[in-house]
Amino acid sequence: MTLPFSELTADLDDIARQGLYRSRRVIASPQGINLEIDGKQLVNFCSNDYLGLANHPDVLDAFKAGVDQYGVGSGSAHLICGHSAAHHALEEELAAFTGRDRALLFSTGYMANIGVISALLGRSDAVFEDRLNHASLLDGGLLSGARFKRYAHADAADLETNLNKAAGRKLIVTDGVFSMDGDFAPLDELALSAKKHDAWLMVDDAHGLGVIGERGGGIVEHYRLSQDDVPALMGTLGKGFGTFGAFVAGSEALIETLIQKARTYIYTTALPAAVAEATRAGLKIVIEESWRRDKLKQLSEQFKQGAEQLGLTLMPSLSAIQPILIGDSQTAVAISNTLANAGFLVSAIRPPTVPQGGARLRVTFSALHEQRHVEQLLDALDKAMAGRK
Ligand SMILES: Cc1ncc(COP(=O)(O)O)c(C=O)c1O
């Protein structure tokens, strides 16, 4: 008799042979631009803490005060006895921030996406997703049981072709800022298509909220789109807002439907109230400190210019995500390791997170980086990529 799971070893070996093996680095310091890993200091260029709020003193103080007031665990799901005044206040503040009627907190973005799509659609409906959507959106579409169609990346014309053939309720789903590419969805065109075909539009703006737009209103601020144009807006709190969790914002009817029907809302423990308090402090900084967004733009611009001079292949990104396309997975990992040895943390992103042959180094910036950090990274990249460009 073989030991349980022993046959999985061959699968793991296969993953490793393809250069796709994933492993974790153990961090011993607070989240920020300087991380301690295995006793070594690295400058961090792969976090989604774009505004540098994950370890901001105001956010930490609010978290500690939240623990004093509410304890650590929330005790149950929101619909049982887990919905605190802190959660409620944060929902109201997020609704005001996004200019939507209401907002509803979810424990993670992954759960929000699965919950929304499954609550809105059933077997007689259809969901249309950008080919490069985040895994949680794709999983949500598949789990909903609706007819599942993927359209070409950022291609409203291809979406139109698919919409023409659809029956039942129709939901168009897209990332706002694409997480692994950094480019924007053509949201103005998608909103027009949605109206023309009487379809709903859902946007996951995990990487845009707090970061894009003068006020940090994200992709909908960039395109000046209202709740009427984008009726379901989803955002995560673990990126630009510096904490953890997610929310969906929209009309009264949408939010009440989610409370009644979204299984990933109903059947899970509410995130800790102290996290909600910390997020309220993060949101205040998002609103008040636009210099963080300006700084991100400057750093990204400096990096783009420097990388172009070095002959690196960048992607058409307008955000704080600036991936360098490598292609081969093993090469991407080798360069990432060389950079780590030189003191820079840049993650190699490989299939299936990105398409086959699309392995890349996903460079991200934080408002806490300085010009010199970008110069040092460019210098290290030049050395690490010598002979590989
Ligand atoms: C576009 C996008 N949507 C959703 C998620 C999931 O959010 P969370 O980490 O809160 O589960 C992520 C990444 O984490 C993401 O990049």
Image: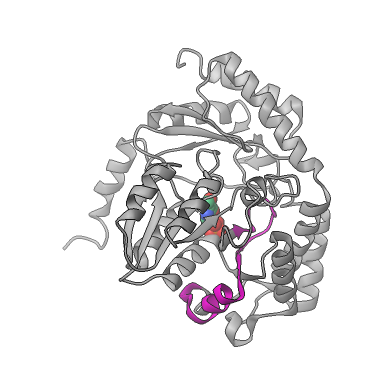
x 62%, y 53%: residue: 225
x 45%, y 29%: residue: 332
Query: How does the figure colour the protein chain or chains?
Result: one colour
Instruction: Magenta stretch: give its range.
Output: 235-264
Q: Quadrant of residue 90?
A: bottom right
Instruction: Indicate whether residue 236 is drawn in magenta.
Output: yes
Outermost left residue: 1
Q: Is residue 182 left or right of residue 59?
A: left
Vertical comparison of 13 with 337: above or below:
below
Q: Position of residue 317 (x, y in %)?
A: 57, 34
Q: Give the total number of marks visible in the rendering.
A: 0
Placement of the N terminus among the 4 image quadrants = bottom left
Q: Is residue 14 left or right of residue 322?
A: left
**Residue nearer the viewer, 102 or 54:** 102
Vertical comparison of 274 with 192: above or below:
below
Q: Quadrant of residue 376?
A: top right
Q: Position of residue 33 (x, y in %)?
A: 70, 39
Outermost front residue: 196
**Residue nearer the viewer, 141 or 16:** 141
Q: Is residue 374 left or right of residue 15?
A: right
Q: Is residue 99 left or right of residue 291?
A: left
Instruction: Indicate whether residue 165 is drawn in magenta.
Output: no
x 41%, y 38%: residue: 350
User: Does residue 307 appear in the picture of this structure?
Assistant: yes
x 81%, y 41%: residue: 291
User: Does residue 269 appear in the picture of this structure?
Assistant: no
Q: Position of residue 223 (x, y in %)?
A: 63, 46
Q: Position of residue 203 (x, y in %)?
A: 53, 56
